[in-house]
Every structure is written in C-alpha cells, then in structure tokens.
Amino acid sequence: MRRPLIAGNWKMNGSLALVERFAQAFTTAELPAEVDIAFMLPAPYLPAAQRSFAGLPVSLGAQTLHPEPKGAYTGEISGAMLKEFGAHYVLVGHSERRSLFHEDDTAVLARVRAALQAGLEPVLCLGETLEERETGSTEAVVSKQLAAVFDGLDESERRRLTVAYEPVWAIGTGKTATPDQAQEVHLALRQRLAQYDTALGETARLLYGGSMNKDNAAALLAQPDIDGGLIGGASLQVDDFLAICQSAG
Ligand code: PGA
C-alpha cells in the first residue's frame, strides 16, 4: 500500500562527473518498478541532473530551502527555484541542519511550510542523540520533533510529508540502528501520526536513515513500519546505491 522510497542524500559531496556516472548506470540498470528512487543533490547539480536523468524513473530533490519565497537573503535558495530545476523533494530538519546551522523546531516548521507552498514534497528528518537514547528519551524526543511540525499543519498538508527517522548517533558513524530498534521508533511515530488522522497513520511514508548500506538495507526494509531509506555515504557509490534500491523491491 505504501510505496517504498529510497533517497540518496549526497550532502556537500559529488561532482558533475558523478551525476553523469549515476545517469549512465541507471539508464541500463534494472530498477524495481515498485520503488520510488530520489537523489537529494547539492542545488548546483540539479540542472545537469534534470537533463541527464530525463526519462529515467527517478526523482530529484534538494537538501534545504529558505523559508521565504524571495528577497534579500544573500546565499539562500527558495523552494520555487528548486522546483524550477526539477526538484520534487526537499529535506527539512536534517540533523546536520539542526546542529550545524542552528535550525530549531520553529525554523523547521517554517521550511516545511515553504516547501509545501512551493509544491515540493518535504522529507522531514528527525532523530535522537546518543545521550537521549541512553537516558531513555528517544520516543519523547522524536514525538516532540514530529509534533512541532505536524501540529502546525492542516490535514491535507500533513498527508504531503514523508518522515525520515535518523538517529543522530547512526548518521555517518557506521553504527546502524538494529532493525528492531528502528522498527520500535517507526511504530511509535506511526501511532503518533494516527492520532492526527487514522488514515495518515496508515499511509504516511516513514524512512530510516543512518549508516544504511547494501548489507543492512534488506533487514531494515523488511520491518513492517519502515517504508524506505535515506542514505548518505552509500548513496555516493553507484553499485551500492543501486543494490539498496533493488533490495527495496
Ligand atoms: P549516512 O547519512 O547514511 O552517511 O549515515 C544518512 C543521512 O545523513 O541522511
């Protein structure tokens, strides 16, 4: 019922050459028809990707956007600009944005709203730190992050979001949540979403992210409440990313 999504988050990595390598490989590869595949690229690569991926069953996305549609915000990029260059998705609230760029829950909600306004599909990222996990507050932390955004949206807006659970301690560390650990949090998030709207609990797409790779993807994706993955490091390797996409099929 829920279509899996495998999204690669390149972060501030890659090159035009890598865009071309992926486009070539994906042209000849067997891609699972029942899986949505997306590349969350650094914004400057969107135009090239839009051309090179034309006709391929993959979508493009960006990694952040400014909350305002336009104006005197030197260095920033609006949702409408991303949309003009083929972005379908945009990550919002990634832990690196929260910690390195001081985006708090209010800033995250403003960006989700801006994304919806621009016709983009926001992928809301949330997750607990190691300390929060060790003190037993994982569920409270992710519920609060979820509510900070979902409380501010109406029913039809809520249905346009994808949520990515990314434990901070698993991002880029090679330490993945076990399938059981991830499933437990996904189930809690789904139950929380169902409190807004029963249908939302059933249809919301929940991704896992944090050191997902070609060897651990299948076990994570086999969990009943994990509907896909947000992949950082492994999304920069053509063969690894393809293998993860195939393991979601
Ligand atoms: P990772 O990154 O797969 O390299 O851990 C995931 C993410 O930050 O989205």
Image (cartoon, rainbow, N blue to C red):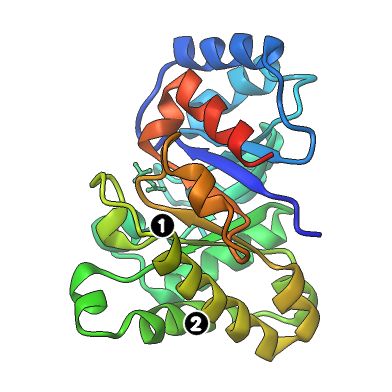
Q: Secondary structure at mark 1?
A: loop
- The label number, if any, that marks residue 94 in the structure image: 1
Q: Is mark 1 within 8 Å of ligand 1?
A: yes
State whether residue 51 is above or below residue 247.
above
Q: Position of residue 178 (x, y in %)?
A: 37, 59
* Number of the label disc, if any, that sits on residue 148: 2
Which residue is depicted at the point 41% across and 44% down?
212
8 displayed left or right of 157: left
Residue 33 lies in what quarter of the image? Answer: top right
Residue visible at 49% across and 43% down in the picture: 217
Mark 2 lies on a secondary structure that is helix
Looking at the image, residue 18 sits to the left or right of residue 31; the answer is left
Query: Who is closer to the viewer here, 43 or 94?
Result: 94
- Is 85 above or below relative to 217? above
The kind of residue tagged 2 is Ala
| Rendering coords of residue 237 (x, y %) | 42, 22
> For the C terminus, which image quadrant?
top right
Q: Position of residue 13 (x, y in %)?
A: 35, 28
Q: Ligand 1: give its quadrant.
A: top left
Above or below, comparing residue 185 to residue 171 in the picture = below
1 and 2 marks in contact (CB < 8 Å): no
Number of numbered callouts drawn: 2
- In space, the residues marked 1 and 2 are separated at their CA atoms by 14 Å
